[in-house]
Amino acid sequence: MGLASNIFYYTFHPSELRSIVQWKVWHSPVHERNEKDETETQKACFKFLDLTSRSFSAVIKELHPELLLPVCIFYLVLRGLDTIEDDTSIPLETKEPLLRGFKDFLEQDGWTFTGNRPEEKDRELLVQFHNVITEFKNMKPAYQAIVKDITDKMGNGMADYCRKAEFEDTSVKTTAEYDEYCWYVAGLVGEGLTRLFVEAEFANPALLERTRLHKSMGLFLQKTNIIRDVREDNDDKRRFWPKEIWSKHVTDFDDLFKPEHREAALNCGSEMVLNALKHVEDCLFYLAGLREQSIFNFCAIPQAMAIATLELCFRNPAIFERNIKITKGEACKLMFESTQNLRVLSDTFRVYARRIHKKNTPKDPNFMKISLVCGRIEKWIETIFPTQSAEVAKRRITGEMTEAERKKREEEADTRQDVCFMMGLMLVIVVIVSVVMVWGIFALLFDDRSQDLVQLVVHASNSFFRLAISCSVSISKWCAPYRRIATMPPAAQPTPDSAAGAEAKEEEAALPPLSAKEFRVYNRLAEHMDQFHTHFRQTYAALTTACDPTKKSKLPPKALITLGLEFCHHLTMHHTIEERHIFPVLARRMPEFRRELSLISQHKVIHKGMDALEAYLEGCRRGELDLERGEVRRLLEGFGGVLFEHLDEEVEALRAENMRRYWSEREMGGLPM
């Protein structure tokens, strides 16, 4: 953006401007690079680091001196390898031995490569690669062995890919191939860095034993880039989204970029994001094993950028039109938060997981899975860094207050009453004084003999005004204890388990109308629950339509069985969560949610029919039974009526008009959902 555009943008986004200033002014590197003591070859290496990657260059230069050069050299070696692999002008018979033997070039003094085409972005790095080799040989032997081993693995992986591209279709078919590609491109980098961290004693050695953790670190970053760059890659005739995923939503990959298939494209993008989000817990677990602040910053910043980018891409049609990225202000905010500690970083992940969950829609076939993975992320963070103790949580649910909170609330109420009393008294005084002053002015204008009288009136008014202020303060203090007694709310009465219809109507009529803000607070649980219920209704409708003999079904038998089993599994999980975590809390005051009443008993009826459906579909899946759509429809209709009645009654019980009868506005925030 130009200067004028920046001024206009940040005028309406001051928080982002604040983040940029905060990062530029207040960020202090943990370690600073000492350029005075560097050799010419070291300076050359850092120059190429700046040229090849500005983002990685900044965080690498702040690393601990022990790993500053090793990580820089590791990055440049892999960048040189990548420059050869990316150059399509190099024939396979030349490229393959270069890639497979690149590790050996690290031992050859003065080796360089000039075979890249002139327009290749990082050609100059290979032309002056002798600087990298010199510094590679100056590293500790243990660091050399790690860099050489990863270079060997990545070089062979790239050579295999180039050979496949020459003779076969290089598009990714399955999610297993997708993970393998991401592993060779980014996962191996994570392995090499982890080995360097552990060798320098800056990370827990257990990270090497749990290979899944550092693998997830690389895969999470690479998958985020692949999701974000889908349009750019497709324009370059490259396809990294696995066919196993996109074929569920469109017939041809190019359909994702056509406006008429936009909803299918968004659902496909959601499934890609879901695939990436499964690595988040491992990434946070990995970061917990780092022992040095600069190493933590180096690893945490890209991960925070990745979760923010995923949230930006989630259900965003713009990714199919152009390349998108987070704003500079948001990036600075993320960098500032990522360089604190794991707790602050986890809070950042929690924020973006909640945003993804909020953007999730029941129309998405993966609605339930996305909700569950977001819930797992938040549960993991809550397990490590609880937002409140058990005692505080219990008080929030029951509405109890500590002595300090009760005293503070009383003082605030007294203060508000005093202010209102004084404002009212002051208003009366102002009116009286104004009337007297106006009368005096008119007397002055129309009767010169009244000047002495007017001066007397003005003097008296001023004295009265000052006296009234002093009296109002004294009266306010004197009356405060009596007002507190007079305005103290009556003791809370227990809500009866049942009430006559007339009494309930009278009680509801006596309640004041809710403001828009209050309605949102009280209606939160109903809206949230209705999202899940909408998903179940749509899935049920899709199953019954697929089994309707009067309609030509587009759902193959295998897909019908899978959808039916997922429906049973998700509904069972939903009811289990309700019965264990939500209904027991609500039942303390709301009779509708007690075990002996209808909502719980409806669960039993639904699950009796659903168990029969699940058993039948499992038999079909194993090949023991032949799938008959009429039988599936009969089993669905056996519990469908009760299911829909249950879904409606449950949401109705959670609506604002009912919830306000049992819970205060403050208590609503502590209810689980």
Image (spheres, helix red, strand yellow):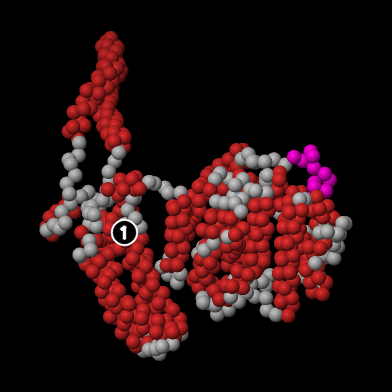
> Which amino acid does the dot numbered 1 rest on?
Ile
Residue 149 visible at all: yes
The magenta stretch is 34-45
16 magenta-colored: no
Q: Residue at x 34, y 45 (%)?
A: 392
User: Foreground residue, 379 or 349?
Assistant: 379
Does 348 sit above or below residue 369?
above
Q: Quadrant of residue 116?
A: bottom right
| Residue 348 drawn at (x, y percent) | 51, 51
Q: Main secondary structure of the magenta part?
A: helix
The C terminus lies in quadrant:
bottom left
Say which quarter of the image contains residue 430. Answer: top left
* Quadrant in the rendering for residue 36: top right
Picture residue at 51% right of the left edge, 46% below the top: 344
Crowdedness of circle 1 by 10 Å Cα count: few (<14), some, many (20+)?
some
Question: Residue 457 in the image: x percent, y percent?
Answer: 26, 14
Name the residue carrying label 1. 582
